[in-house]
Image (cartoon, rainbow, N blue to C red):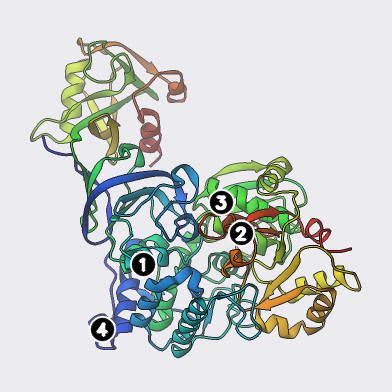
């Protein structure tokens, strides 16, 4: 193990002179840095923290947050929680859940963390630039900002990103260094892929690649939102922190010598979708995992405008800021009979309180929602047009 | 000989002794481990990890997964310890903040469900109760781009009739390289060779024995081989043809990592 060299100031924090929170924080960063082979801590420009929903954090998590609680040192955004704070929903919440959830929110507020409550903080709240060193949690956001923006973060956990936010620094290893960002596998992906097919590509590749950074070839026309779908599905089923797409992402020249080569055909993509899909009409159509952008809200508004709604409930998920900026599209969707929620999502809210089956175009949600004791849903995973045929008369 | 002692990497301090649950899968602690301490998918679906040492390939998925261990621990239904083949930092963070000892760089195929394992998260060592460890050196001897394969005699104590390199037990006071040279002379009558590389130990489980094998790459000046009775045949082959032979466990992949490292 490498010896991580702390500065004099950092050592004082390590010894507890800045209080209990910073002491816990820097000790965690020190341990993780030594494992990763870092020789020092480096300043970060921002942090993003996961571990907000009471469904995920639990009582043990609340105790930990109280212990580590301290004012954050850099701009820090926050992941979604179990319900929409101002508007209620998406499902019924019992009093204990509500109380515990707001307790968690208050602890974060006292630390000076933004009220962003989104897994896509890179829209408006916390937008990193190329080359920025940051410390982010939320698997789908980490892989998105590394790959599409070129900011630099390791795959931080909720607690380690919080520790970095408090100290304002992170261990210098892995993705913070050019050598940690090289692709070791070339993936030749066949054919044009849409949002859901990119998500399926992520589900297919995740377990196969495990932690190896891929460079995807044959997809020069890939759009940002499609790669957001890939990001979320790939990182749910692996521990991959980054990918490159030839002709699209900015660091796609970073490839190791003699990488492995994999071929992925349309057949594999369709089989992946088929495996998690059901033709039975679900009780709920849920879209927005990761949270929707303004562009996506506009697109969906265009599809349902002036139409009559039938069948299952239609829930869309986004952040407060995107919802406010896309007020027109939101109104159209609400007039149609759909609901647009902020602060929360289909994965971190206790959906099974009200629903047994969910249709979604999200690869990530199709991974988490069926798990027993977690999502407890029967899931229909399919493209947005197939989902909407159930709700448009 | 006492219980086996396998060297991994210490990730979260503390010690634990318990039965091991071996899950040959990646696990997202969020979702794939329930609030009741059950694994919810993959080969270990419905297996309870409470009080057990949980061994799995590594973590995946949500970065909130660290909190799963904290939550289980706070309700006294957490695992006693964690073992990974290759750890990533979400699970390690969970282990550290939950005071659960953890070790990685342990190949899962040396563990069997129900083994009683002692784990030391500081030193990185584990030992398995009732499983004896034997230290072995194996020489991959090269000459002119070819590698020497030996067919083990039918009376060999382990893997009779299978194809291997030059191997033997490391005797007290011997280094693996000294063992390799001694065996080379005994089994093949070869003295004149140069050591090219000594690889990292690999572990092979055979019932109640774990072989800790140190692989050694050597180059011989001559291709002349004089067998003793430990082996029934030999052949010099192009390494790319190795897949045509029924070799002892992990023989081929060890060769690949030895020549490519």
| Above or below B188: residue A374 | below
The structure residue drawn at horizontal position 67% and vertical position 75%, both measured from the top left corner, is A318
The numbered dot on residue A206 is: 3
Location of the N terminus of chain A by quadrant is: bottom left
Asked if residue A8 shows in the view, the reply is: yes
The numbered dot on residue B70 is: 1
Question: Residue B66 in the image: x percent, y percent?
Answer: 41, 65
Chain ID, mark 3: A
The numbered dot on residue A8 is: 4
Residue extending furthest right?
A306
Mark 2, residue position = A364
Q: Position of B120 compared to A189: left or right?
A: left
Q: Position of A341 compared to A308: left or right?
A: left
| Above or below B87: residue B213 | above
- The tag earlier along the polypeptide, 3 or 4, is 4
Question: Could you classify mark 1 by the number of other residues whose Cα lies within 10 Å: few (under 14), some (14-19), or many (20 or more)?
Answer: many
Question: Residue B188 in the image: x percent, y percent?
Answer: 23, 16
């Amino acid at each position: 193990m490498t010896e991580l060299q702390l500065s004099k100031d950092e050592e004082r924090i390590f010894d507890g002179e800045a209080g209990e929170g910073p002491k816990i924080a820097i000790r965690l960063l020190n341990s993780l840095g030594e494992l990763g082979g870092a020789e020092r801590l480096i300043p970060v420009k921002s942090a993003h923290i996961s571990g907000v929903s009471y469904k995920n954090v639990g009582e043990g998590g609340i105790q930990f947050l109280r212990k580590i609680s301290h004012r954050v040192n850099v701009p820090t955004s926050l992941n979604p929680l179990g319900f929409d704070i101002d508007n209620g929903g998406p499902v019924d919440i019992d009093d204990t859940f509500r109380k515990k959830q707001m307790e968690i929110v208050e602890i974060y507020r006292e630390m000076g963390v933004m009220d962003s409550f989104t897994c896509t903080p890179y829209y408006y709240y916390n937008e990193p630039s190329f080359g920025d060193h940051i410390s982010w949690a939320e698997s789908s956001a980490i892989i998105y900002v590394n790959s599409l923006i070129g900011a630099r973060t390791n795959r931080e956990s909720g607690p380690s990103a919080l520790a970095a936010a408090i100290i304002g620094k992170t261990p210098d290893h892995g993705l913070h260094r050019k050598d940690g960002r090289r692709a070791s596998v070339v993936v030749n992906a066949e054919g044009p892929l849409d949002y859901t097919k990119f998500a399926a590509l992520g589900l297919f590749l995740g377990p196969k690649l495990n932690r190896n950074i891929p460079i995807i070839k044959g997809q020069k026309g890939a759009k940002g939102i499609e790669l957001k779908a890939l990001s979320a599905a790939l990182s749910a089923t692996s521990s991959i922190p980054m990918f490159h797409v030839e002709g699209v992402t900015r660091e796609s020249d970073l490839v190791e010598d003699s990488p492995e080569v994999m071929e992925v055909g349309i057949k594999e993509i369709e089989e992946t979708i088929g495996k998690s899909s059901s033709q039975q009409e679900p009780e709920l159509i849920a879209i927005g995992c990761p949270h929707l952008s303004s562009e996506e809200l506009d697109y969906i508004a265009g599809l349902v405008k002036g139409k009559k709604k039938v069948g299952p409930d239609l829930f869309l998920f986004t952040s407060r800021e995107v919802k406010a900026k896309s007020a027109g599209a939101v109104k159209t969707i609400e007039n149609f009979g759909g609901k647009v929620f902020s602060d929360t999502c289909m994965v971190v809210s206790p959906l099974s309180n009200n629903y047994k089956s969910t249709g979604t175009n999200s690869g990530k949600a199709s991974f988490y929602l069926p798990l027993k004791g977690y999502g407890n849903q029967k899931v229909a995973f399919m493209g947005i047009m197939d989902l909407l045929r159930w709700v448009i008369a | 000989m006492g219980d086996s002692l396998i060297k991994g990497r210490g990730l979260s301090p503390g010690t634990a002794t318990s039965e091991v649950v071996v899950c040959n899968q990646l696990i997202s602690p969020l979702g794939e481990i329930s609030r009741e301490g059950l694994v919810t998918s993959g080969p270990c679906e419905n297996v309870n990890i409470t009080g057990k040492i949980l061994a799995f390939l590594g973590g995946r998925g949500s970065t909130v997964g660290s909190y799963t261990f904290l939550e289980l621990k706070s309700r006294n239904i957490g695992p006693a310890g964690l073992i990974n083949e290759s750890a990533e930092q979400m699970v390690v963070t969970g282990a550290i903040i939950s005071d659960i000892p953890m070790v990685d760089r342990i190949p899962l195929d040396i563990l069997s469900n129900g083994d009683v394992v002692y784990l030391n998260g500081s030193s990185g060592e584990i030992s398995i109760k009732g499983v004896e460890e034997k230290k072995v050196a194996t020489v991959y001897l090269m000459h002119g781009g070819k590698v020497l394969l030996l067919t083990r005699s039918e009376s060999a104590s382990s893997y009779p009739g299978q194809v291997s390199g030059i191997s033997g037990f490391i005797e007290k006071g011997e280094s693996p390289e000294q063992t390799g040279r001694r065996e080379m002379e005994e089994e093949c009558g070869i003295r004149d060779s140069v050591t090219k590389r000594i690889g990292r130990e690999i572990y092979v489980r055979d019932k109640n024995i774990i072989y800790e094998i140190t692989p050694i790459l050597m180059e011989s000046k001559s291709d002349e081989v004089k067998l003793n009775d430990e082996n029934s045949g030999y052949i010099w082959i192009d390494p790319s043809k190795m897949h045509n032979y029924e070799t002892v466990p992990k023989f081929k992949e060890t060769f690949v990592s030895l020549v490519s490292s």
